[in-house]
Image (spheres, rainbow, N blue to C red):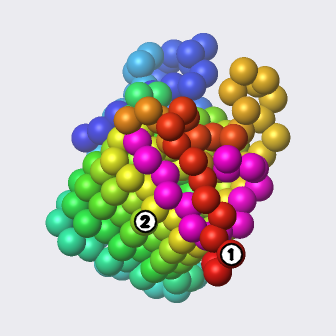
Amino acid sequence: KFKMYHENYNVFDLDRSLEFYEKALGHSFDNELDVSCNRDGCDFTREAYIGDVSYATFEDALAAAKEGDTIVVLSKIVIEGDRTLDLTGITIDSKYVDFDNYAMVVKGNLTINGGSFNFDNYYGIGVTGKLTVNGGKFTTTKDYYLIGNFGETVINGGEFEALYCNVNSFAGTVNITGGKFTVSDYSNPDYPPCDVFAEDGGEAIITGGDFSTDVTNYCPNGHTVENNDNR
C-alpha cells in the first residue's frame, strides 16, 4: 500500500476524501478493493490503471501498455538497474503527490527514447544514478523542478515544459546537447523561471538545445555557459 496526501486540507472525512481523489485523478475507485481514506490522505492498493483496468504494479501496467494507451500511475516510480524505455505513443500520467519527494526516482541507469511523461507532483524526476534522454515529452503541472539531478543526467533530445524550472543540478553533472526547454511565466520575482540551473554543488554543461530563458542567467558563481557555434 502507499499513500497520497491531500492538497486540500479541508477534506477530512472518508467520503469526501474519496470524492476528492476521484475528481483529481479522473478515475472512480472500488472503495473496498482499491483505496481507503482518512483525514491524512488515501492508501491505494493498486499502483496503476489503463482505462478501467487496474494493475498491482506500475511494471505490470507498463508490460500491458500498447500504442495509444495512457498509464495513470498512483505510486512513486522507482527505476533500478539498467533500463531502456522506448514508449513512443504511450503516455505516463503520474498522479503521485508528495510534497517532499520526486514522483519518479532513477537509481540505476535509465535511457528514455520516447513517450510522454506528465507529473502532477511538485518534483518530477529525481536522478541519483544516471538518466539519458534521447527523446520524449516531459511536463509538470506544479511548481519546482521537472528534473532534479543528484547523479548524472544527459539530455540529447526531447521536449521539456515546466511551470518554474526544467532541470536543476543539485549535485553531479547535467550534460545537455539538445532538446527543447520551455517554462511558463512564473509570477514570483524572487524566483525567476529557469530552464537550467546549477547549484553550488552541481554542474550544467550546455552545448546545444532550444531554451525559453537565457541560460547564462542561471549559472552560480564560478560557472559559465559557452555557446557552441557547431550545434
Quarter of the picture containing the C terminus is bottom right
User: What residue sits 61% from the left and 59% below the top?
Assistant: 226
State whether residue 111 is above or below residue 166.
Answer: below
Q: Secondary structure at mark 1?
A: loop
Does the image show residue 59? no
Which region of the structure is painted magenta?
202-216
Q: Position of residue 225 (x, y in %)?
A: 60, 53
Residue that mark 2 sits on: 154
Magenta stretch encompasses residue 154: no
Along the line of sight, which residue is nearer the eye, 228 or 102? 228
User: Which mark is on residue 229?
Assistant: 1
Question: Relative to 42, is 17 on the left or the right?
Answer: right
Nearer mark to the viewer, of 1 and 2 = 1
Q: Pointer 1: residues within 10 angstroms few (<14), some, or many (20+)?
A: few
Q: Position of residue 24 (x, y in %)?
A: 61, 41
Dot 2: element: strand
Along the line of sight, the residue nearer the viewer: 13 or 136: 136
